[in-house]
Image: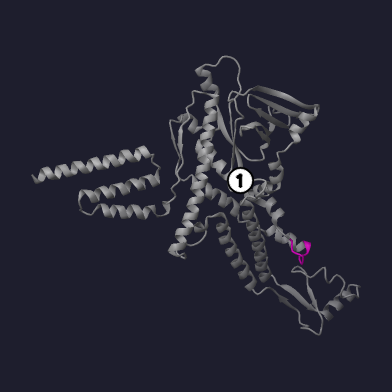
Amino acid sequence: MSMMNNYLFSGRHPEYIANERAWRRSRDAYSGGAAYIDAALIRHVSEIPVEFEERRRRAYYFNYPRAIAQRITQYALAVEPIRRHAVPELVEDWSRSGLRTNEVMRQLSTLLSVYGRAWLLVDSPGFSGEVSLERVRDERLRPFVRALSPFSVVNWAAAPDGRLEWAVIAEEAIVNCDPFHYPERRRRRRLYERHHWYLYEEKSSGIEIIADGANAAGAVPLVPVTEPDGYGLDANHWFEDVVRISEAILNNESEAQMNVVKQMFGMLVVSDSFARGAQRAAGRDRAGEGFSATVARSAAVIESVEEKGISRYISPSGVETRMIREENAALKNELYDVVGLAIQGRSREAQTAESKSWDFQNTSQFLAARADLLEQAELRAWELMHRFDPGIPVPEVVYNRKFALRDLEKSIQGLLQLSTIDAGSGYRRAVNRTAVELVDAINALSAQEKREIVSEINQTAKEEVRNENQGTD
């Protein structure tokens, strides 16, 4: 095994090294579940192990990171993008595994929210021998596109022209072809160069090339996508702050839950004399032994005779629980403010008209920037598919950038009422033009389509005027 091939499996890009820890934390927060609770729950200094174990087992997680990442994707892609001249078969199965183009782009959008870095891989299955149209159809020998997380693309380099010179993708193959043998996991690395590709596999005897071939695209078939907000080696991604606030809510909520439990099951307090008598009866005449280790909800608290001297149960008053819940509500609002989705995280009725407008503009600009990023990435992926197969046209891709849908229903109702007013042709023409803008808000129209519709409206208005004049004559 050569040193070069060994580095192929162990090498990491500086960006990968700098962000791997944060990426893993964001991934775990998005995934949630018991494993994440175990990692994120914090034991406070006055908590004994048995009590913390109970709190850990009772803990539950409101997965705000996943909700935020998915909400951004849902809003950014609420209106299906326009793909003029796209091959319908490819749009319906862009990944060659059943995922439509919209679904692959949703994956990409969510990956961007969680990591700030994602990739689109464009590739084509290898084949040999003559290729007929029937074989192409039966074996589905065509390019495909898949969204990759930053964990998949472990190393890469850019050439002087600014494009990728090479890239290494980490793969894990599960060989399970024999029903009488356990499946085998095999670590692999796929190296893409501009004109060739190689597939390496780690074996007991060393690292071997198990496949290679010409790269028909003539370029490294990866589309790198990053949010252009300063993220990279010098700035952290905003989702890290989402995770930290979410973890604070998790810990606060866990404490609030245990306070509720303590209110239902109070802590026993006994007099010092009682404790001494009980310990003497057990052959131990040291009342203070183990005192500091047993002060917890699950054990008795010992008081001296000079104090109350009366056995009783004590528990939190409940005020603390309410304060914790109020703090969590405030943290949730701050969480959505950090992301730029403030209008979605609080009651619209509680906001002034000015704050509603400001928050909506903030949200709209955030989503428009995401739509612009997705549009560019998808277009580059289609261009790479065209490089693999010149018979695949590069469609005109247009993503929606108008997110004024929250008041669309009221706007349509108002427009319908206006259209019932009996006025002149100029008034009706103005109403019809407003309707065009609403149609554009629902389903983005091209500039040419809008011109044609407006021209039709004007032509109809002229004919109405001509008919009115003829009727007057």
Q: Which amino acid type corresponds to the residue marked 1 in the rendered image?
A: Gly
| x and y percentages locating residue 346 in the rendered image | 51, 61
- By what rule are the colours in the image chosen? one colour
| x and y percentages locating residue 419 in the rendered image | 26, 52
- Residue at image point 18% right, 43% down: 464
Q: Secondary structure at mark 1?
A: loop
> Magenta part mainly helix, strand or loop?
loop
Whether residue 312 sits left or right of residue 455 in the image: it is right
- Residue located beneath label 1 in the image: 116
Q: Quadrant of residue 88?
A: top left
- Residue at image point 55% right, 25% down: 388
* Nearer to us in this view, 122 or 36: 122
The magenta stretch spans residue 45: yes
Q: Quadrant of residue 41?
A: bottom right
Q: Which residue is farthest top?
A: 130
Whether residue 401 sits left or right of residue 139 in the image: it is left
Whether residue 135 sits left or right of residue 190 in the image: it is left
Q: Which residue is farthest bottom?
A: 306
| x and y percentages locating residue 167 in the rendered image | 66, 32
Instruction: Identify the image quadrant of the N terminus.
Output: top right
Q: Which residues are magenta?
A: 43-49
| Relative height, residue 139 to residue 15 (above, below) | above
Q: Which residue is farthest front?
A: 160
The magenta stretch spans residue 404: no
Do we see residue 146 in this rendering?
yes
